[in-house]
Image (cartoon, helix red, strand yellow):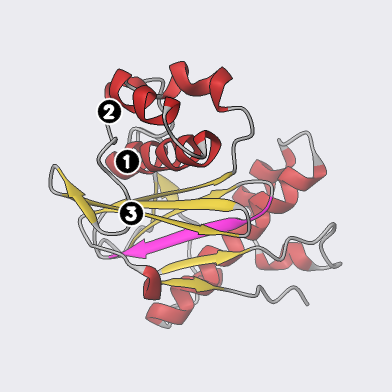
Amino acid sequence: MLYYSDNIPLSLPEGFSRYVPKERLLKAERYYQEKDRILCLLSYMLFSDGIRREYGTDIYSEKYWETDSNGKPYLPGHPGIHFNISHCAKAVFCGISKYPIGVDVQDTITDAESLVHLICTPREQELIKNAEDPDRLLTRLWCLKEAFFKQSGEGISDKLTDVDLSDVNGVGYRKSGLFFSVFERSDCCFAVCSKEPFSEPDLHSFQLALE
């Protein structure tokens, strides 16, 4: 399933930290901006609530996730549970699957012309040049590519222009044995890449319990 929340508070309630493992708190503290620290913590809460909803497993009481050599998180003792998280200024996003999964959420780009050469193949650049809404299309392609690299375990990559997704135009597209899906909510783009197909009914708005 896919879970997102766009109710991003300006601050977190007192005592909120008791719900978050020490490792995640330390990661949050490394962000310079307070909003980024909040998003980092909320993305963990979204993951944890999603896991409990799907598997009835209280991750709060278990060892915090670990990361592999490429920095991709996994749950020791739960090899059949795969997940990935992402956040942007307006939302947090989590995907949970029985297969390796990559997700990404991006605020809508507002200046496609300055970024297109850093993200797109020549074919994609041509599509964006002729698009009715270049910013929206570039956001979708960027988001899909980030999800692809996260699914493979490579993480955020500087090889965006090596992957052509010009033929991915919606939900459930399959390429190289992987399913690509893209959704739009709250002026954000949500993308997922996995061996399991995802569609609109799989995307759930989740109101995080902050009390």
Of labels 2 and 1, earlier in sequence is: 1
Q: Can residue 10 be seen in this view?
A: yes
- Front residue of 195/67: it is 195
Per the model, the C-alpha gap separating discs 1 and 3 is 15 Å
- Going by the picture, which residue comes out furthest to the left? 177
Of labels 1 and 3, earlier in sequence is: 1
Which residue is at 72% across, 36% downward?
Answer: 31
Q: Which amino acid does label 2 sit on?
A: Val
Tag nearer the camera, 1 or 3: 3
Give residue 78's position: percent from left, percent from top: 31, 65
Q: Is the magenta stretch mostly helix, strand or loop?
A: strand
Give residue 74's position: percent from left, percent from top: 37, 53
Q: What residue type is labelled 3?
A: Gly
Location of residue 124 (image quadrant): top left
Location of the C terminus (image quadrant): bottom right
The residue that label 1 is drawn on is 148
Q: Which residues, given as a range, are shown in magenta?
A: 90-97
The residue that label 2 is drawn on is 163
Numbered circle sitting on residue 170: 3
Residue 208 counted in the magenta span: no
Q: Count neighbours of disc 2 (C-alpha within 10 A) and say few if under 14, some if 14 to 19, many if 20 or more.
A: some
